[in-house]
Image (cartoon, helix red, strand yellow):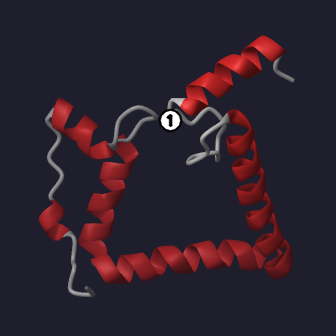
Amino acid sequence: MASEQQRAELDERARQGETVIPGGAGGKSLEAQEHLAEGRSRGGQTRKEQLGTEGYQEMGSKGGQTRKEQMGKEGYQEMGRKGGLSTMDKSGGERAAEEGIEIDESKYKTSGR
């Protein structure tokens, strides 16, 4: 567990808008981020218990297939290229631009909107 001083530092960073707890995005304090992360984790676990592990995995797979159908095969592959370039501090688009890697977003099919 973090010491009192470490918790105070994390709380200050959270109050400045930084996400200091994985899954705590949106929390305005360390405690709020801890509660958000716990609730998000528990929500996923509850759904997993309802569906069973195989059903939960299948649900994720179906979501990917649906997105692939919406975007078209080429757009989905291009989105994967962009996502693969992302890091903790930069989006895939930012990193692609920095490194001169072309991402052809015209391949994204948007007829579903």
Mark 1 = which residue? 17
Quarter of the image for the C terminus: give it: bottom left
Disc 1 residue crowd, few under 14, some 14–19, many 20+, Cα 10 Å: some
Question: Residue at image x 46%, y 34%?
Answer: 88
- Residue 53 in sight here: no
Question: Residue at image x 21%, y 86%?
Answer: 111
- Residue 89 in sight here: yes
Quarter of the image for residue 67 reads bottom left
Q: Position of residue 98 (x, y in %)?
A: 19, 31
The count of marks equals 1
- For this view, does 80 lie left or right of residue 62? left
Q: Position of residue 96 (x, y in %)?
A: 22, 40
Quarter of the image for the N terminus: give it: top right
Of helix, strand and loop, which one carries label 1? loop
For the residue marked with disc 1, what is the amino acid?
Gly
Q: Position of residue 81 (x, y in %)?
A: 31, 52
Question: Residue at image x 76%, y 75%?
Answer: 54
Q: Nearer the viewer, residue 1 or 88?
A: 1
Vertical position of residue 78 compared to residue 9: above or below: below
- For this view, does 1 lie left or right of residue 33? right
Vertical position of residue 99 compared to residue 106: above or below: above
Vertical position of residue 74 compared to residue 80: above or below: below
